[in-house]
Image (cartoon, rainbow, N blue to C red):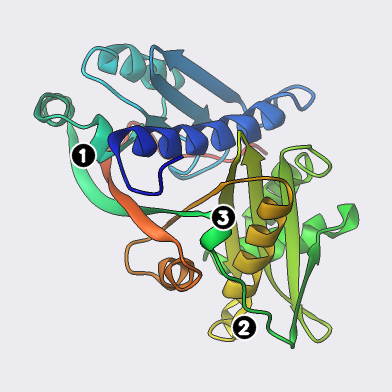
Amino acid sequence: MSSVVTKELAVILDESEIEALESRLRTIQNMQGNPMDVAIKRVESTAAFSVKNIPGPAYNTVRGASVETLDDILRFYEEREIPARFEVTPAQSSPELFRSLSARGFFQSGFHTVLYGEAKTLSSRPISDINVRPLEASEFDLFGEIYTRGFGMPEFLKQPVAQNNLVLHGHEDWRLYLASIGSKAAGIGVLFMKNGIGTMAASAVLPEFRNRGVHRALLDARIDEAKQHGCSIIAGQASFGSGSQRNMERAGMKIAYTKAIWDPFYEARRFCVAD
């Protein structure tokens, strides 16, 4: 695979993100009774994801949208009474798509950076006082606490986050990690591996342990794991200009593209969490 950014590479990187999200949500969907009310709709090259009982846009998102599939996808979200978010890559964008989104009540609300690198060119930097190891099945309450605090989420979401990640424990394509400084848990990281691509799926660091190298240590551990499993490409996402983006670039990853985020002017309803 070429290390130079091309439209073909951009499509491959986007598809790797879609595969990671679909793998996660299919696993959650297969929980007895589908308690999070997961639904996934594929129309041609468009993938629409909906998790009715997990608040926020992270899992209620559309990838690979086109003018031709737009109305079908919007009906899917209207039937579920959930607002959609569209993540549009430069490789899949067009003036017609942007006009169609605007005409249907959407506006561009932000950007998100996608990074990648050839695994063989990426470097790790051991940090002596930070220990990174696989997360144990008994530690997912801790995972939920770090994840929600790290991302500034409400405390009542700790248990749903723990439950929705516990189902990934032992999955052949997923790895979850805990970083500690001394005896204190400091951060968590998640890795998804498929088709030779290692995707940095999520990482969170407790506020009191930031700027001490924890995020970079989690990144290095996941890169090393992906290399050991034969991944040739490492991919990840980050908020534009964030510390996460800087750490990925310091490890040797490059910016592939910046996605445009499109949200509705008015939400159809507020997200809820199942009792």
- Residue located 65% across and 42% down the image: 193
Q: Give how far across and how far down residue 96 sits, in percent.
A: 11, 24
In the image, farthest residue toward the right = 138
Q: Is residue 133 left or right of residue 256?
A: right
Residue 209, which numbered label?
2
> Callout 1: helix, strand or loop?
loop
Tag 3: amino acid: Ala
Q: Nearer the viewer, mark 1 or mark 3?
A: 3
Residue 48 or residue 212, whichever sits in front: 212
Residue at screen point 58% across, 55% down: 202
Mark 3: give few (<14), some (14-19) or many (20+) Cα within 10 Å.
many
Tag 2: residue type?
Answer: Phe
Give the numbered dot on residue 265. Answer: 1
Q: Say if 88 sits above or below 185 in the image.
A: above
Q: Distance between the residues labelled 2 and 1?
A: 37 Å
Screen quadrant of the C terminus: top right
- Horizontal and vertical percent for residue 29? 67, 26
Query: Which is closer to the viewer, label 2 or label 1?
Result: 2
